[in-house]
Amino acid sequence: MVKLLLDNGTGVNVQVEEYGTALQEAASEGHEHIVKLLLENGADVKAQGGYFGTALQAAAFKGHEHIVKLLLENGADIKAQGGHFGTALQAAAFKGDEHIVKLLLDNGADIKAQGGEYGTALQAAASEGHEHIVKLLLDNGADVNAQGGQYGTALQAASAAGHEHIAKLLLDNGADVNAQGGYFGTALQETAFKGHEHIVKLLLENGADIKAQGGHLGTALQAAAFKGHEHIVKLLLKSGV
């Protein structure tokens, strides 16, 4: 059917709202033969548009390693910015796909690239609790204190989501416990708002400033009080607010 449409003059690079182009849609769904056919008929492998920004980001997010390889072999821009996740590396990191993350890094993906909802690949992986990806990114030079995205830093993302093991890993690798950024200002305020008592304790043990101001709700105590987390309020008061 795709071949018939192409033979009858259907534009191979026509954009639609959700997926951008036919190539992005085929890449997203893992249809390798369609991807090859579209490329053979002049599909722009670098075309921008749609939710995923590029065909490469779509394939990386959906875990289609064979499509990622095919697109790279055909000139896809591994550092292209755009779409919900910013880059293909951030999309793969968010999904926790170690094979694709390694493939992208081996092909020159910028581990420190900024953009998308989560700011960096490290923050994306931290937010979803993918410890193996966080370790891989740190081992390859990811900036543990990079700012950006909705959470501000990877530590704030891990703290917000309640991923204690990731928060510990980031702190052990030099994460700034008092870094400011994102909607809630600090990791302590973020986790106090979410009610993660174990992470509040971890952050305090690692030097979190209990009186730090910033973010939407001002302080960690205000954040915990706003959400009605009595156990967090008691802990913060006991710790010297």
Image (tube, helix red, strand yellow):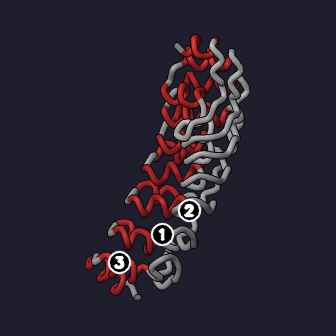
Distance between the alpha carbons at the discs numbered 2 and 1 = 8 Å
Residue 189 at x, y percent in the picture: 44, 74
* Among the two numbered marks 3 and 1 on one chain, the one whose residue lies closer to the N terminus: 1
Q: Residue 187 carries which label?
A: 1
Are there few (<14), some (14-19), or many (20+) residues within 10 Å of tag 1? many
Along the viewing direction, whichever of 61 and 197 lies nearer the viewer: 61
Residue occupied by mark 3: 224
In this rendering, the answer to whether 177 lies above or below 86 is: below
Q: Is residue 198 above or below residue 94?
A: below
The residue labelled by disc 2 is 153
Q: What type is the residue that disc 2 sits on?
A: Thr
Q: What residue type is labelled 3?
A: Ala
Q: Which of marks 3 and 2 is nearer the N terminus?
A: 2
Q: Residue at x 55, y 27 (%)?
A: 27
The local secondary structure at tag 3 comes to helix
Where residue 5 sits: x, y (%)?
Answer: 58, 16
